[in-house]
Amino acid sequence: GCYKGLYLTFVRHCKFSNLNVADAQNFMAQCVVELFGLDLSVAYEHAFVYIRQLAIQLRSALNATQNKSQDAHQVISSWQYVSALKLWARMLSAYPGAQQLQPLVYPLVQV
């Protein structure tokens, strides 16, 4: 529950991004990475779910019909989406030797 809330709060605060909030978002991302690093097996479970969610959002944007295309493309071109991708890339690169997180590298790179 705590990890889920942590991630969702981070994503919620990344809805809008500008120079005034960039440092706070960067600090928040580092905190998320460090807290997830306390238990990498739990981090794997959450990262798997959220990376999969990002992949599904990308796939639905690519397969969107003309009517839904605008909304779907807004989702994947939002600061929330980009910040979430950056967060997971940051987490996986922060623990390169962690066997628990290795299976997540390929799916994240594909997204």
Image (tube, rainbow, N blue to C red):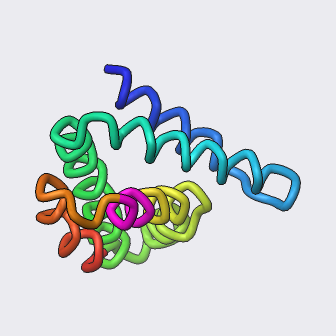
> Is 11 placed left or right of 97 in the picture?
right
- Residue 25 x, y percent position in the rendering: 67, 49
**Considering only vertical position in the picture, is 66 above or below 101?**
below
Residue closest to the far front: 97
Q: Main secondary structure of the magenta part?
A: helix
Q: In terms of depth relative to the viewer, which is nearer, 71 or 2?
A: 2
**Considering only vertical position in the picture, is 61 above or below 4?**
below
Q: Quadrant of residue 107?
A: bottom left
- Residue 100 x, y percent position in the rendering: 13, 52
Q: Is residue 100 magenta?
A: no
Quarter of the figure that contains the N terminus: top left
Q: Residue at x 53, y 44 (%)?
A: 11
Q: Which residues are magenta?
A: 88-94
Quarter of the figure that contains the C terminus: bottom left
Q: Residue at x 49, y 64 (%)?
A: 86
Residue closest to the far right: 20
Q: Residue at x 28, y 70 (%)?
A: 108
- Residue 105 x, y percent position in the rendering: 22, 70
* Total number of numbered discs in the rendering: 0
Q: In terms of depth relative to the viewer, which is nearer, 33 or 64?
A: 33
> Is 24 placed left or right of 106 in the picture?
right
> Is 92 placed left or right of 84 in the picture?
left
